[in-house]
Image (cartoon, rainbow, N blue to C red):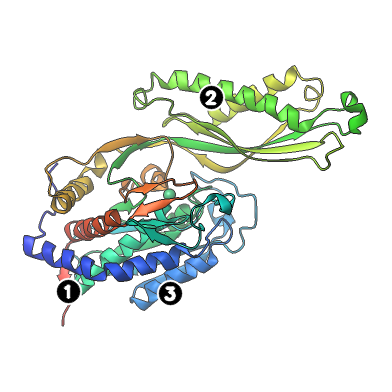
Amino acid sequence: MQSQNANVSLEIADRIRVAVENGFEEQTAFLADFVRIPSLRFEEAAAQDFIAESLRKRGYAVDDWTINLSDLEHLAGFGPVMGDFSRARSVVGSHRPSVVKGQSLILQGHLDVVPAGPHEMWTYPPFDPVVRDGWMHGRGAGDMKAGTVAALFALDALARAGFEPAATVHFQSVIEEESTGLGALSTLQRGYRADVAVLPEPSNFTINRAQVGALWFRLRVRGRPVHVAVAADGSNAIMASFDIIRALQGLESEWNVRAASDPVYHDVRHPLNFNAGKIQGGDWASSVPAWCDVDCRMGVLPGQDLNDAKAEIEACISAASRDHPFLSNNPPEVIWNGFQAEGYVLGPEVDPALGVMQDAYRSVFGTDELLVENKMTALTDTRFYGLYYNIPAFCIGPKAENIHGFDERVELESVRKLTILLALFIAGWCGLNPIPK
Ligand code: ZN
């Protein structure tokens, strides 16, 4: 791949590298402070404050707004929210250069993290980051606070080296990546655009060429409550929900058989995963449960029509209910909420940016090997930029382990390399203006 802006001289690249090294201790401390904020869904305000304040201190033009669902509902990619969305915010810090020479850039990171599970199962407390053997432990350290912080400190390093990006850069801090993507969608609705969007999700320096889509839904199963003494006269909603879950596992198998002939995913083993991820039900140990709610996720292939996929899921649930004495007359309700996300495959429009990234990669790793591309069985916010707004978008990020699991951690050496990589990418893509002394 040939890049358009391979104009970062060795001397400048070296200055940038040194500037990253000099700031890395501060960067690691900053990352720990960020991980310490438990930015779970609907509780992201303190973390957004932290980022907004950091951007303001650095002199970015900061846009910090409350997301209004009614602004987004009609937009492609929208996913409905169940829960209190009244305090949901997006934060964007913009750099606008004195002289424009290069191409504009969105650097985007999500700060929402998934629940940590029982804290006693962690070696170190999930929101009290600890560095051991070169890895920082903590929920969100890998997915994806280390990447976001690397982007911020890459920009800092350029400034310390005496430069500003010679094109507009929007540094975006979003929420909801793990549930709907509405944070990313809100920045696009607000009008932010660029020539490329880079999302430093943990990828161990691979490029995600393709990602699946996902549907979230709540299965609302009802039963007939009776005293357990006459359990046979009732209908147990919790037990009945297992029948539906098994039927959905059957549909998952069917879809994966189909995926074997998909033009993109044919060589990926079991790309589509169904998950019964959260279950609540019943009221009393001696009453046959009257209700059970199961929150589910099903993967879909790029190009798979979401309405068709939903119809198949609903048909599967009603078929499984038909044989059931109680559910046949009281079929479960399916509530579509959260991800209503299509898959996304990078097209050739992303190649110029990948060319610049390739040059930066060569410089950081001292290798002539090409960036490794992969096909994800999960999804990222890149889809909004790429599918609906014509902004090529890709992920590249640090080495992390156990994301969404116990003992999530990120390797600090990979964070250091990522920071240099992003700084060199910004230099190559946006160009550089010397900051007047
Ligand atoms: Zn992530």
In this rendering, does residue 140 appear at all? Answer: yes
Instruction: Say which residue label 2 marks.
Output: 252
Answer left or right for 365 relative to 112: left
Tell which of 206 and 168 is nearer to you. Answer: 206
**Residue placed farthest to the bottom in the image?**
437
Label drawn at residue 375: none
Identify residue type, mark 3: Glu
In the rendered view, tell whether residue 121 sits above or below residue 151: above
Q: Earlier in the sequence, mark 1 or mark 2?
A: 1
At numbered mark 3, what does the secondary structure look like: helix, strand or loop? helix
Q: Quadrant of residue 248?
A: top right
Answer left or right for 307 relative to 170: right
In this rendering, does residue 98 appear at all? Answer: no
Tell me residue 380's x, y (percent).
Answer: 42, 45
Cα–Cα gap, marks 1 and 3: 23 Å
Label drawn at residue 162: 1
Q: Quadrant of residue 424?
A: bottom left
Is there a contact, CB below 8 Å, between mark 1 and mark 2? no
For ligand 1, tell me if the residue under mark 2 lies within 8 Å: no
In the rendered image, the quadrant that contains the N terminus is top left
Q: Earlier in the sequence, mark 1 or mark 3?
A: 3
Is there a contact, CB below 8 Å, between mark 1 and mark 3? no
Tell me residue 413's x, y (percent).
Answer: 27, 56
Instruction: Say which residue label 3 marks.
Output: 53
In the rendered image, the quadrant that contains the C terminus is bottom left
Answer left or right for 52 relative to 27: right
In the rendered view, tell whether residue 386 sits above or below residue 264: below
